[in-house]
Image (tube, rainbow, N blue to C red):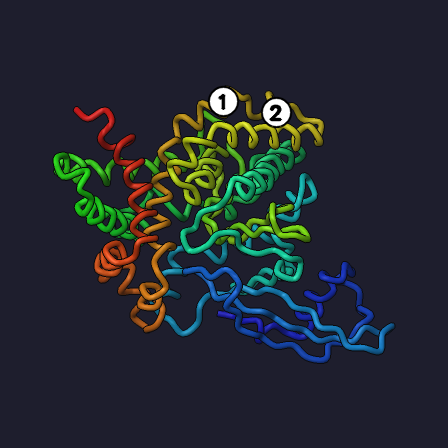
């Protein structure tokens, strides 16, 4: 795997030229590179599927006496962990994300609006981005992973720009994204054409085992426990069908990884309400109905109580944003995503937000001491995704109030409405 230190001097120069809005083909860039280095970062969003670093470049502009330091955010596969490397290669996440940043997002940004950080290099399993932290962007959630109404409203505008930009771009080219950029939207999160030994299916089954252990510990379900445990995994597995490119509803480019740490917010001078947001981590991008993204972002970082109070209003706001973005491109939303069609898809895929919540949050809301067990040893990653997941998660469920409350909230919503409801 290549790292930023393996980039050639000409590649580093190209990164700087793109940042300075210069033509990369220009042989005299107007600056000299003095040095460049990687600097580990702990305050950037951390993920299971990537290694995050700052790339710092010191250069001297020809018209200036003072050297200038540029800082970029870079992302590569984690090094020195064979089990995680094997998982990443089987998962195919880096090549997909490179394809998205190289071939899809630049044209989408031109067609509609910026939805992701500018990417200055995408190759060799390495991505180099503008550093959003320099522009005042930061993650918006505390350890419980919950976002506020104002944050979600801001995020929905960016999400609508992503989906609308996909529609606008397809309208311009006359071709579907699956035709023009198939590598960017191959389904790698919940592939349906794989056998029971495939890592994603095994990972899903292991997640369901953990969630059923949680249900066993919840007094509310003791009288219906056998029925719930017998039917839980089947109800959860609906996601493998739901995420397919639809023949019934319009499809767009989807982000498909919308938990709180993948949403960066920029705040104003007084830091109250966010001004705008950017989406990061496009490793799981897909081509499917936009309601899947909308329901995911309105479920993973929210509580049942919040959704009961605000879901309908926020769905309407998303549709209003979509209408406006398409109108700016002289397109009528009724032609591409009729209102009834959108709300029908929301109804049909309503359980997906909760399924994603359960699958994401039993991992990403683990307390720090549990996460250390996952990352501190060479076998930690393999242990967690196979051998010790139940042990680590059940221990957290029993001992950590934040973790337990979040998982109970989403599990009760799912079990009550999609497992028990309609019980025969």
The residue depicted at 81 percent of the width and 73 percent of the height is 61
Spatial CA distance of label 2 from label 1 is 11 Å
Q: Which mark is residue 333?
A: 2
Residue 89: name its quadrant: bottom left
Residue 369: name its quadrant: bottom left
Apparent side of residue 231 relative to residue 361 in the rendered image (left or right):
left
Q: Looking at the image, is 187 positioned above or below residue 316?
A: below
Q: 367 and 247: which one is in front?
A: 367
The residue depicted at 62 percent of the width and 28 percent of the height is 323
Residue 326 image offset from top left, x and y in percent = 65, 30
Residue 387: name its quadrant: bottom left
Crowding at mark 1 (Cα within 10 Å: few <14, some 14-19, many 20+): some
Can you see residue 103?
Answer: no
Give the labeled residue for mark 1.
Answer: 341
Nearer the N terminus, badge 2 or badge 1?
Answer: 2
Residue 381 image offset from top left, x and y in percent = 32, 65
């Amino acid at each position: 795997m290549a790292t930023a230190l393996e980039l050639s001097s000409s590649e580093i120069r190209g990164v700087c030229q793109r940042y300075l809005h210069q033509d990369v083909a220009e042989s005299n860039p107007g600056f000299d590179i003095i040095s460049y280095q990687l600097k580990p970062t702990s305050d950037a969003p951390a993920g299971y599927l990537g290694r995050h670093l700052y790339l710092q470049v010191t250069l001297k502009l020809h018209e200036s006496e003072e050297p200038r330091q540029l800082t970029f955010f870079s992302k590569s596969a984690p090094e020195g962990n064979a089990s995680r490397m094997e998982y990443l290669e089987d998962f195919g996440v880096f090549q997909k994300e490179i394809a998205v940043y190289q071939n899809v997002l630049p044209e989408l940004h031109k067609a509609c609006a910026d939805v992701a950080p500018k990417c200055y290099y995408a190759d060799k399993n390495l991505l180099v981005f503008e550093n959003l932290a320099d522009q005042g962007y930061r993650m918006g959630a505390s350890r419980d992973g919950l976002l506020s109404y104002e944050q979600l409203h801001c995020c929905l505008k960016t999400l609508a720009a992503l989906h609308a930009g996909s529609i606008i771009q397809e309208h311009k080219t006359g071709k579907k994204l699956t035709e023009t950029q198939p590598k960017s939207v191959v389904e790698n999160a919940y592939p349906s054409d794989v056998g029971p030994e495939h890592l994603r299916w095994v990972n899903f089954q292991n997640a369901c085992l953990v969630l059923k252990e949680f249900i066993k510990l919840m007094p509310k379900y003791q009288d219906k426990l056998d029925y719930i445990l017998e039917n839980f995994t089947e109800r959860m597995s609906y996601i493998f069908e739901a995420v397919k490119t639809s023949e019934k509803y319009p499809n767009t480019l989807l982000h498909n990884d919308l938990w709180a740490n993948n949403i960066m917010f920029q705040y104003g001078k007084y830091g109250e309400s966010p001004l705008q947001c950017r989406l990061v981590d496009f490793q799981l991008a897909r081509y499917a109905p936009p309601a899947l993204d909308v329901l995911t972002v309105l479920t993973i970082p929210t509580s049942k109580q919040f959704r009961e109070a605000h879901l309908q209003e926020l769905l309407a706001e998303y549709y209003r944003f979509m209408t406006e973005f398409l109108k700016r491109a002289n397109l009528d939303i009724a032609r591409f995503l009729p209102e009834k069609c959108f709300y029908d898809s929301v109804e049909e895929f309503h359980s997906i937000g909760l399924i994603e919540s359960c699958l994401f949050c039993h991992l990403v809301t683990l307390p720090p001491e549990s996460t250390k067990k996952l990352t501190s040893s060479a076998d930690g990653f393999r242990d967690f995704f196979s051998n010790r997941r139940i042990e680590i998660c059940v221990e957290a469920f029993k001992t950590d109030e934040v973790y337990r409350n979040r998982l109970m909230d989403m599990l009760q919503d799912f079990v009550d409405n999609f497992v028990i409801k309609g019980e025969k």
